[in-house]
Every structure is written in structure tokens, then in C-alpha cells.
Amino acid sequence: LSRLPGIGERSAARLAYHVLGSSREYAHALGSALVTLHDRVRRCERCRNYTESEICRQCRDVTRNSELLCVVARPQDAAAIERSGMFRGRYHVLHALLSPLDGVGPEALDVLPLLDRIHEEGVREVIIATPLSVEGEATALFLAQELKPSGVRCSRSSTSTSSSTRR
């Protein structure tokens, strides 16, 4: 359990004791859920967020603003924005940030599906909501350059603060 991100030795021990103190059925259900996770969950065909169906709930929601697209690095970033209840547009999940030192280049971002969505869905504004880190800033600058020819308006917002600056 300590191999999980954010889980140290003490937290892993607490989790293990919790499972051991629970019923055998609970432990089996937890194990079964983990074993079948990759079989049940996939990436949404539109936004690339995790979902159990071909198209996720946010992409199917016709009440969301289809002209506003928020680009995030990770699915948990989209989830955090959703919990705020302040954004009613759609999302696009990159699943990566540029990091040349780690061997992560522009090809890892797979920008083509994002450009296709902008064209096909009539997106007018893209909010680039990557973290305030070297990798997040590099990714935001790269995306802004890639999106410029499309004529779409680009905004910059961080997933760690609520500040927004126009680019």
C-alpha cells in the first residue's frame, strides 16, 4: 500500500489494519474492485477523462457550455474543478505534462484530439488549467502556441489557485 502516491509507511499500516479489522467480505470486495478496475474503467472518447462508459457524464450533459473547454493535466484536476461547482463547460484531460528531463515531449500530449474537438464542437474559449510548476507552465505555453492558428480564445488558469490570466 505504501507504493501508492501520497501513502507513506504509517498510512499504509493504518489502511492494512483497517482492512484486517473489517470483514472478510469487505477485503474480498476491495480486492475484486481493484482487480477489475482496468476492465471497467476507460478513457472517455471525447475528453479522455476516466469513465465506465464510452462517453463520460460531463460530455453527455447537454446543459453544459460546449463553447468553453477546460484543459487539465490529470483526471483528478477535472474532479477538483467539478467539486467547486463553478465551471459548467467541458473538459479535456491531457494525462501528461511536458517534462523534457523525464523524456516527456510534445508527442505525449497528443494535441490532435484537442484540436479536433475545438473544430468539431464549436469551442470558442479554451482555459488551460495546468499546475503552477515548470512542467505546467511549459505545457500551457506549448498548448497556447498550438491553439493559436485555430483562432480560439485561450485563457490561463492554474489547478492550484483560482487566478486567471489571459494569453
Image (cartoon, grey):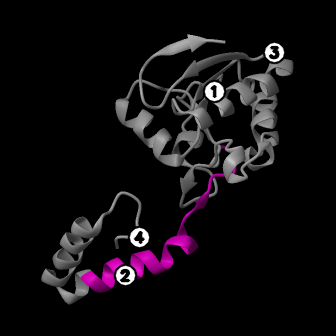
Tag 2, which secondary structure?
Answer: helix
Residue 31: which numbered mark, if any?
2
The residue at which mark 4 appears reads as 3
Q: Quadrant of residue 15?
A: bottom left
Q: Give amino acid for label 4.
A: Arg
Tag 3, which secondary structure?
Answer: loop
Crowd rating for badge 2 (residues with CA inside 10 Å; few <14, some 14–19, many 20+): few
Q: What residue sits 47% from the left and 31% below the top?
A: 159
Question: Residue 7, image x and y in percent?
Answer: 32, 62
Question: Residue 119, image x and y in percent?
Answer: 81, 28
Residue sitting nearer the eye, 3 or 58 = 3
The range drawn in magenta is: 27-47
Q: What residue sits 17% from the left and 78% below the top?
A: 17
Question: Residue 113, image x and y in percent?
Answer: 78, 42
**Comes first in the chain, label 4 or label 3:** 4
The residue at which mark 3 appears reads as 151
Q: What residue sits 73% from the left and 29% below the top?
A: 143
On whether residue 94 falls in the magenta region, the answer is no
Tag 4, which secondary structure?
Answer: loop
Q: Give amino acid for label 3.
A: Gly
Q: CA distance from mark 3 to mark 1?
A: 16 Å
Q: Quadrant of residue 121?
A: top right
Q: What residue sits 21% from the left and 67% below the top?
A: 10
The residue at which mark 1 appears reads as 66
**Comes first in the chain, label 3 or label 1:** 1
Q: CA distance from mark 4 to mark 3?
A: 44 Å
Q: Quadrant of residue 142?
A: top right
Residue 44: which numbered mark, if any?
none
Tag 1, which secondary structure?
Answer: loop
Q: CA distance from mark 2 to mark 4?
A: 16 Å
Q: Is residue 72 above or below residue 23?
A: above
